[in-house]
Amino acid sequence: MKAQIAQYAKESLAPDGAVNAARAAAVCDYIVQNEPPSRKIPVLRAYMKKLARMIAKEEALLECSGDVPPETLAQIEKFAREQAGGGKIRLAKKIDKSLLGGIRLKIADDVWEFSAKSTLDSLRPQ
């Protein structure tokens, strides 16, 4: 079933590599019409989980303590795209003064933090 779910997920991608809602809906229709009754729900659940992971990798959150120069932002976007598998990625920015300088980048469940706050936190006794 794993290979089949991977194929369904691949069929859900637009030419730019992002998950396409219309294509995903068409895949769901295909599953409902063609899978045996006993497999429909398990296949749809596995497909939904796969799509959720794929969509999460398309979105990145950049938290920073202040403005980020355009050159640095371009490097961060490139890094985020590489970490997400090279596909399309949407980068949202959020100011977080508690970082005390630096950045935190979140993609799905992965977090990269390069800030004075994380350095200071690591120096605190446990």
Image (cartoon, rainbow, N blue to C red):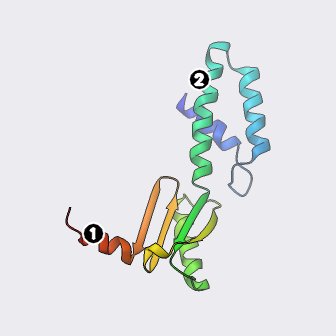
- Percent x, y of residue 61: 57, 64
Residue type highlighted by circle 1: Ser
On the image, the x and y values in percent for residue 60 come to: 58, 62
Whichever of labels 2 and 1 marks the residue nearer the N terminus, that label is 2
**SS at badge 2:** helix
The residue under label 1 is: 122
Q: Quadrant of the C terminus?
A: bottom left
What label sits on residue 8 in the rendered view?
Answer: none
Residue for badge 2: 42
Residue occupying the far front of the picture: 98
User: In terms of image quadrants, where is residue 125?
Assistant: bottom left
Query: Residue 82, how many percent across, how many down?
Result: 53, 64
User: For mark 2, does the 10 Å Cα neighbourhood hold few (<14), some (14 to 19), or many (20 or more) residues?
Assistant: few
Quarter occupied by residue 95: bottom right
Which type of secondary structure does the marked residue at label 1 adopt? helix
Amino acid type, mark 2: Pro
Name above or below for residue 32 compared with residue 109. above
Task: Look at the image and tell me in which quarter the N terminus lies.
Answer: top right
Taking depth in this image into account, of 25 and 124 the one nearest to the observer is 124
Where is residue 15? Give x, y as percent.
Answer: 74, 54
- Decide if residue 115 is on the left or right side of residue 20: left
